[in-house]
Amino acid sequence: MAQTDKQLDVYYESTPNPEAMKFYWGQNLAEETLFFDDPLKAHSRSPLASKIFGFPWAQAVMVGPNFVTVTKQDWVEWPILAQPLSGLIQEHINGDEPLINELAPEQIKEDANSIKDDDSEAVQKIKTIINQEIRPAVAMDGGDIIFNRYEDNVLHLEMHGACNGCPSAAVTLKQGIETRIKEALPEVKEVVEAKA
């Protein structure tokens, strides 16, 4: 997606995860959401994430269409980092540098949350709920939920961004997501976190 001619301001807010901060602006500048917990993977896909990983305290970066969630190491505090990091992100965006590098068509992998023709009716229903209800809700807190697999009536989900390592993630998973999924599909026994 093209960058903007208008200068954007970058704001930040805490998330339920005390180690993660959400930085946001008022316009979509990318068309996908990517999570990086490895600086080497970020290098080729996201110039912004790669720049953030240049700091030794950076643990994970999630780049979304209109926000970035940064997870820090526990030995440094947000009051020291938030304002300068907001400035760095704002400078990156307003310098017309891309958030995410586009891939050549042959490099594009299918989105795990997209509904496929060979998905079972249950998996299609699960993915619809994830995409329409759950992902938008957790994105407000700087997180993302990715479908991993559904087998033996157990749904495995990956937690990214602020959700990854969040102390309240287990509560969100069990009392929020699991409750909603079981409401739609009573045959689901459990919703668990899958390791990416």
Image (spheres, rainbow, N blue to C red):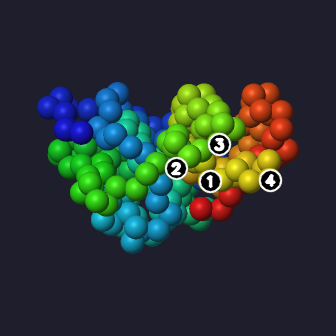
Residue lying at the far front in this picture: please name it.
118
Q: Residues within 10 Å of mark 1 (few under 14, many from 20)?
A: some
Q: Which residue is mark 3?
A: 120
Q: Nearer the viewer, mark 2 or mark 3?
A: 3
At a point 70% along the width and 50% down the height, the residue shown is: 150
Counting residues from the N terminus, which is met first, the one under dot 3 or under dot 4?
Answer: 3
Cα distance in 3D space between marks 2 and 3: 14 Å
Q: Amino acid at mark 2?
A: Ala
Of pointers 2 and 4, the one earlier in the residue sequence: 2
For the residues labelled 2 and 4, the Cα–Cα distance comes to: 19 Å
Q: Residue at x 17, y 46 (%)?
A: 95
Question: Residue beneath label 4, please?
Answer: 152
Earlier residue among tags 2 and 3? 2
Q: Whole-Å distance between the Cαs marked 1 and 2?
A: 7 Å
Question: Which residue is drawn at the image coordinates 46% and 60% (left, top)?
Answer: 36
Q: Is residue 42 above or below residue 146?
A: below
Q: Quadrant of the N terminus?
A: top left
Q: Secondary structure at mark 2?
A: loop
Give the mark toward the camera: 2 or 4: 4
Q: Nearer the viewer, residue 74 or 196?
A: 196
- The reply, left or right, for residue 179 in relation to residue 109 is right
Q: Label 2 belongs to which residue?
A: 112
Structural distance between the alpha carbons of marks 1 and 4? 13 Å
User: Would residue 35 appear left or right of 176 to someone viewing this image?
Assistant: left
Q: Earlier in the sequence, mark 3 or mark 1?
A: 3
> In this rendering, which labeled residue sits more in front, label 3 or label 1?
3
Calculate the distance from the C-alpha at mark 3 to the C-alpha at mark 4: 13 Å
